[in-house]
Image: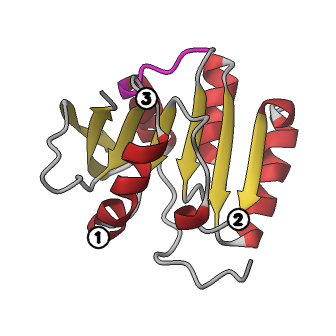
Amino acid sequence: MSLRKPDIGFIPTPPAMVKAMLDLAEVQASDVVYDLGCGDGRIVIAAATQFGCRGVGIDIDPVRIETARTTAATKHVADQLQFYVADLYETDFRAATVVILYLLPHLNLRLLPQLRQQLQPGARIISRDFDMGDWQPERSLICTADDEEATLYRWTIA
């Protein structure tokens, strides 16, 4: 598989906002959290350390994935997590019970048919800052952390 350049640059999510995203998703130990465009893996690493769940991080940037793997090992959760260098739009994420997104609006919309096709009923989708067009979120909240403000959105697959 030939990887293309990233659609967006890496913008780290502050730890308090990561916690708010995981809380909004109501993550449990039985969940499998996927972060699509995971960057340094901080969200799935936090999910594994805080909730004991499994997780998968996917990013097109091999340097970010290597950082994520190293951090997961340092935090002793590498056995609960997998990280892949891959294109989101060519990825199978059927095992996900929670999907985390911090993409741009047009990228969310491009991913939406894949999310609806692959995810099982009850799977939760959390997006930072960007909605899904006409698909109204069931919940949203404003989160402020480290002088950053973001809107967090939640949808559940019916």
Give the SS element for disc 1: helix
Q: Amino acid at mark 2?
A: Arg
For the residue labelled by badge 2, is the local secondary structure a helix, a strand or a loop?
helix
Please check the rendered image and state whether residue 112 is part of the magenta-colored stretch, yes or no.
no
Residue 4: x %, y % from top left: 61, 84
Q: Furthest-top residue in view?
A: 29
| Camera-nearest label, 3 or 2 | 3
What residue sits 64% from the left and 56% below the top? 58
Residue type marked 1? His
Q: Which mark identifies residue 64?
A: 2
Residue placed under numbered mark 1 in the picture: 106
Query: Which circle's residue, 1 or 2, is located before the other in the chain?
Result: 2
Q: Earlier in the sequence, mark 3 or mark 1?
A: 1
Residue 77 position (above or below residue 66): above
Q: Quadrant of the N terminus?
A: bottom right
Marks 1/2: CA–CA distance = 23 Å
Earlier sequence position, callout 3 versus callout 2? 2
For the residues labelled 3 and 1, say whether their Cβ atoms are less than 8 Å apart: no
Q: For the magenta stretch, what is the residue range?
A: 24-29
Q: Position of residue 46 (x, y in %)?
A: 62, 33
Tell me the residue that label 3 is attached to.
Answer: 123
Q: Residues within 10 Å of mark 2 (few under 14, many from 20)?
A: many
Seen in the picture, residue 146 relative to 78 is either above or below; the reply is: below
The structure residue drawn at horizontal position 79% and vertical position 41%, both measured from the top left corner, is 72
